[in-house]
Image: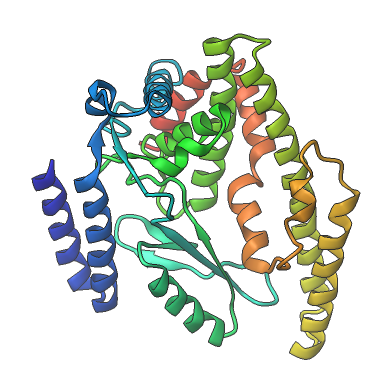
Amino acid sequence: MKKKILITIFVIALLLILVNGKLLIYGLQQGWGQFNIIRKAVPISDILLDPNQPDSLKTKLEYTLKVREYAMEKLGLDESDNYFTYYDQGGKPILWNLSASEPYELKPYLWKFPFLGSMPYKGFFELERAKKERDRLAKEGYDTRIRTVSGWSTLGILKDPILSNMLERSDGELAEVIIHELVHATVFIKDEVDFNENLASFIGEAGAQQFLKDHYGDSSRALTEYIQELDDSERFKRYMLRGTQKLDSLYTKIATEPDSIKQQAKNSMIAKIATELDTVSFNNQKYKEIFNKNLPNNAYFMAFLRYHSKSDSLKSILNDYDGNISRMIKDLKKRYE
């Protein structure tokens, strides 16, 4: 497996040399970061047999294996070597995601990569490198955002591990993130990031609900709690999507104004969106505290378009398949093969 990883990194490096020297450096950094995590990951089977490991960890890892098996057998996601290993983060983030947007337009900054095409975000295994790239973009006038990443996919190329921070999620959220990342390893369309992320988010949520029903039962506490979590999440997402529409309309309206007027109007609109979040009813009041420390910017709003703007159309497509996720995935794989 290590040989396969090193060969993959070497091939990518050669391609990047031909394309862009800076991309080469970035590719090597990312490849090395990924390699280090995979190299240090421990087979889940070894942990389950280790009498010194806590039962709480074993229970969570056994659960991840069941989700993984269900995703492939019942949801039609591709077989892979993903999530057979476990990496202990020591309670610390190990990967950060940087995104950026035009200051007065909901238009993402795009990075171009071999194979993947244009991407509206860029990953870093070192926070300082992410901050350096962020500062460069901020100086050029872009809105920027750095967030930690709790899971990612190498599209089935490498052996993605379960990360320890993933296990801190509820059963429903953990099933969702595993299915989400396995969708990426099954259906990925070059230069169609919004579709890829919307599809993974939608199938992650729908697949997690189906798994919880089959695993625990229709009236189980795990399913009930997850549905409540989704209800809050859905209310927040729809509110923020309406906010993106308001911002988009504003930017069109003030397109010919000087930047000072644009900035003033933008600040006023974003402050209003953040303040009026208090009018939304949530089961968990944490949502009303999201903007207490920092107001969102265009890069933040863009994430809702990237991950959730197509959920209604995807729900309609799933209904055409009578709710059968496996049939839907099968046809998508054929269409984008």
Relative image position of residue 283 (x, y in whole percent): 80, 36
Is 50 displayed left or right of 192 in the figure?
Answer: left
Q: Quadrant of residue 188?
A: top left
Measured from the top left, where is residue 101 in percent x and y? 59, 70
Residue sitting at the far left: 3
| Residue shown at the point (78%, 90%) measured from the top left | 260
Dividing the picture into quadrants, the one containing residue 126 is bottom left
Q: How many numbered callouts?
A: 0
Instruction: Give the left or right position of residue 106, taking residue 265 as reference.
Output: left
Task: Please give the name of the residue rendered at 86% of the width and 41% of the height, measured from the top-left corner.
Answer: 281
> Which x, y percent locates residue 2?
12, 46
From this viewpoint, is residue 258 visible? no
Q: Residue at x 70, y 40 (%)?
A: 233
Q: x, y (%) of residue 99?
A: 52, 66
Front residue (pair 1, 17): 1
Question: Please, is residue 13 above or below residue 221 in the view?
Answer: below
Question: Does 254 appear above or below 201?
Answer: below
Q: Residue reaching furthest front?
A: 52
Residue 32 vs 312, above or below: the answer is: below
Identified at 77% across, 80% down, the residue is: 255
* Quadrant location, the C terminus: top left
Q: Is residue 314 above or below residue 223?
A: below
Considering the image in quadrants, where does the N terminus appear?
A: top left
* Residue nearest the viewer, comparing 303 with 196: 303
Task: Give left or right: position of 112 versus 105.
Answer: left
Colour pattern: rainbow
Is residue 230 at least partly visible in the picture?
A: yes
Is 53 or 63 nearer to us in this picture? 53
Direction from residue 87 to residue 249 in the image, left or right: right
